[in-house]
Image: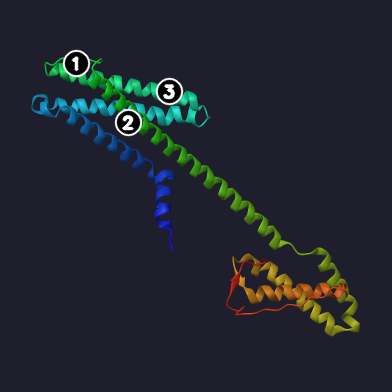
Amino acid sequence: MFKINTEGQAFLYDLLVNSKFRLGRHILFIVSLAAISFNQTYVIFQPEIPVLGTRLYWIALGNLASYLAVAYLNIYVLVPRYLMQKSYLTYTIMIFGIVLVLLWIQTIIEDTARIWLGQSGGNILEPVFILNYISSFATVTLCMMGGSITIVLKHWMTENNRVNQLERIHVQSEVEQLKAQVNPQLLFNVLNRTAVLAKSEPKEASEMLLELSQILRYQLYDCSRKAVLLKTEIAFLTNYLALEQVYSHRFQYTVSAEGEVHRIFVPPLL
């Protein structure tokens, strides 16, 4: 049988949604983009690293800045303004547009580095350049879409958690109201009947008051707990039915209990 790792799920949820991890999420995101930028720059200019020297870091920082600008533009502008508003076509067009701008900026950065090296820029009509451009466009677009899906997932989890909390509060409120209710008609009938029997049949009147006191005690005190013994719940139902039977002779009932009812806990007024 498979076991669900609830601790891992809770940590993943907090990592995506909880505000206390917000700074950590941004740091992790920036560090990831920095690693991608420096690796990309290192791969492209690996033969020229001795010639570029420290300028290699400036090239990598330029690539990182372009990635961050596009990523945060997507996170804080495009996703909430278009994707969350279900303007999917507009969002897709905007994503394609900013990815093209990103690649254009990185091409300018790369050509500038070539100029530092005394080399000429690449010919954009060369098949290799076109294939590389298409590959980069597809890769960056997929990464952007993946990031957007993560944001949508975070939004969905937040909204789902808020709705669940409201539902729990609503249900708990209804349960508490039900627990606090005492049948006013039953209470009136018992007190009226007790007053009549007080002189003629004091023993029966005393038993009725005892049953009523046990019912009231259960509703006022035991029902405030999250769980009570099943034996106590059965006793409450038995007392309640016994009082109801006093005023309806055609009302018949039987209560049977099996098992260790004195060890099992259930929610009150189940």
User: What is the spatial separation of the Cα atoms under label 2 and label 3, in whole angstroms?
Assistant: 16 Å
Amino acid residing under circle 1: Gly
Q: Element type at marker 1?
A: loop
The quarter of the rendered structure image containing the N terminus is bottom left
| Along the line of sight, the residue nearer the viewer: 196 or 148 | 148
Amino acid residing under circle 3: Met
User: Which is in the foreground here, disc 1 or disc 3?
Assistant: 1
User: What is the spatial separation of the Cα atoms under label 1 and label 3, in whole angstroms?
Assistant: 28 Å
Q: Position of residue 45 (x, y in %)?
A: 15, 27
Q: Does 197 sit above or below residue 124?
A: below
Label located before the other in sequence (2 or 3): 3
User: Which is in the foreground here, disc 2 or disc 3?
Assistant: 2
Q: Position of residue 162 (x, y in %)?
A: 54, 45
- Residue 121's disc is 1
Q: Which residue is mark 3?
A: 94
Amino acid residing under circle 2: Thr
The local crowd at label 3, few if under 14, some if 14 to 19, many if 20 or more residues have their Cα within 10 Å, is: some
The local crowd at label 2, few if under 14, some if 14 to 19, many if 20 or more residues have their Cα within 10 Å, is: few
User: What is the spatial separation of the Cα atoms under label 2 and label 1, in whole angstroms?
Assistant: 23 Å
- Classify residue 15 as left or right of residue 158: left
Residue drawn at point x = 67 percent, y = 78 percent: 257
Label located before the other in sequence (1 or 3): 3
Residue drawn at point x = 34 percent, y = 43 percent: 24
Among the 4 quarters of the image, the one containing residue 108: top left
The quarter of the rendered structure image containing the C terminus is bottom right
Q: CB atoms at circles 2 and 3 under 8 Å apart?
A: no
Q: Which residue is mark 2?
A: 139
Q: Residue furthest left?
A: 50
- Classify residue 224 as left or right of residue 75: right
